Amino acid sequence: MKDLFFKYIHELQDTITSKLEMMDGTAAFKEDIWKRPEGGGGRTRVIENGTVFEKGGVNISGVHGKLPASMQAYFKVGEVDFFACGLSLVLHPKNPMAPTVHANWRYFEMYNEHGDIIDQWFGGGQDLTPYYLFDEDAIHFHQTCKTACDKHSPDFYETYKNRCDEYFYNSHRDEARGIGGLFFDYCKASDAMSMAQWFDFVSEVGNSFLEAYVPILEKRIHLPYTPEERNWQEIRRGRYVEFNLVHDKGTLFGLKTNGRIESILMSLPPHVQWVYDHHPEPNSREEQLMRVLKTPKNWV
Amino acid sequence: MKDLFFKYIHELQDTITSKLEMMDGTAAFKEDIWKRPEGGGGRTRVIENGTVFEKGGVNISGVHGKLPASMQAYFKVGEVDFFACGLSLVLHPKNPMAPTVHANWRYFEMYNEHGDIIDQWFGGGQDLTPYYLFDEDAIHFHQTCKTACDKHSPDFYETYKNRCDEYFYNSHRDEARGIGGLFFDYCKASDAMSMAQWFDFVSEVGNSFLEAYVPILEKRIHLPYTPEERNWQEIRRGRYVEFNLVHDKGTLFGLKTNGRIESILMSLPPHVQWVYDHHPEPNSREEQLMRVLKTPKNWV
């Protein structure tokens, strides 16, 4: 399973970065291959200052060795070996009419002293963070998520959509980071789903990513925008930073377990503002967005 | 003591904000009085888009009531009442040649069921975060801190200077946030120091703030700078955000104990950048700063 999924994310990284480079037209992904001293490493691909993408990263990594002490406590296990691999992406378009997107698909294994697998699971998801809300974009993104889910279980979309709304939540502001999508974790073998079936589901979601996001980008990246709309985007990007640095378990894990900092923090937006006590004008498009972030909606 | 210190920080807030407004010349502090539902409140003063100050806050608060559960665990006490008050300030000048400064002076009391004080202490400090290093500024700032300390104990400067270097450290980047200053906490009555003597020390440091910072500002705010130097400032401000959101206990406490978000996060800089894997040119002024941040120096 580990080889199968590792191969899958390599190919998916290629597919996604080729398509995004083509869309951007001017900027290319810069590739950094890195090694983790304790075992494994990764292939980071970052695009900056493009026509479409102001900043973005599509990274894969596969790491293994002794489970770090902080993760032993987190998973409530003793000293075990582990393997973890995944693809993480965050794209920050320049145009404030185009949403930021985040996606991640990952696989985890733990072993006993004989090298037998004692636990294994998949996790991941994809979610959208618009600065200006276009209902048809939110519906398209969620419909694509739902179509991928429905092929595997009638319950998955509702369950993982709700988990996404719960997880990507800036509790200190009482607002969602974005308009959600899917979030799943600890997808383990059960009577209902074998690991092979979970692989099919996770790769189905992975394969749906470009279909979920690219049509939205195509509609929005040529729209005109004002300096005020750009300011609003940069202020909202501040909330993205707040979520990633204060609440996101993946980011904090990486920072506290000696991950490659630049690969972890590629998720942070390029230009960001913090304005004291900023509130959008009543009945403005900015306030429309806030209303949806305060009370997550069902889009499909 | 609580009334004495609360009065002191009110007056200090007035002194500091009048002086800073005069220095800025164009922008005024906006005042927000807020109430905490569980008891107490604060007076937040924020300045934005000034000639000198791109953003800054000089806030006081005094809060009381039942100690929140998360703080009970932190202080290892049961259900007790508390009172806490303090002044917190962060100033982000526009000119990258002028350093950001942070200061905080605070007092804490806890009570038993009869309302007797069971514990009380002072905490605080002040520290400087330059974007371009001028040795004479670092020396002036530290010398002012040392002069204030030396009036109260020959050990204070060295002890609190080292604690400052340890505390304001971005461990995930292996670099200091800035060039330090003073950091002290849990200053409690002992054979050597009564609470009245601690008050004298803390107010001595508070009174030294303008003397420590204003002469540096006066030297730097009229220096010319390039767009590249401004970019460097915005990138370094990103590290300031990382420290405050990932490591700063005060910020995280505030966010997790239902503090007034806008007063807590006034510390975040106005315009910030994250650039993937940015490294200054060898032997540049930017690299000079990094060398000092990697290995904190003794300035006096």
Image: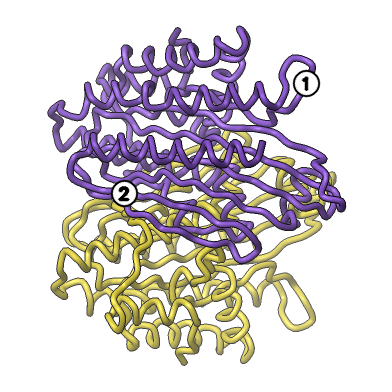
Chain colours: A yellow, B purple
Q: Which mark is residue B190?
A: 1
Between the residue at mark 1 and the residue at mark 2, the CA separation in whole angstroms equals 39 Å
Whether residue A30 is visible: no
Q: Looking at the rendering, which quadrant does residue A38 occupy? A: top right
Above or below, B16 against A230 in this view is above
Identify the residue at image location x=44%, y=53%. A59
Above or below, A174 against B41 in this view is below
Tell me if mark 1 has few (under 14), some (14-19) or many (20+) residues whose alpha carbon lies within 10 angstroms of its own. Answer: few
Q: Which mark is residue B48?
A: none
Which one is earlier in the sequence, the residue at label 1 or at label 2? 2
Identify the residue at image location x=58%, y=52%. B254
Decide if residue B88 is on the left or right side of residue B156. Answer: left
Q: Looking at the rendering, which quadrant does residue A16 occupy? A: bottom left
Identify the residue at image location x=36%, y=78%. A289
In depth, the one of A146 and B134 nearer the eye is: B134
Q: Position of residue A22 (x, y in %)?
A: 23, 64
Above or below, B167 against A98 in this view is above
Residue for badge 2: B29
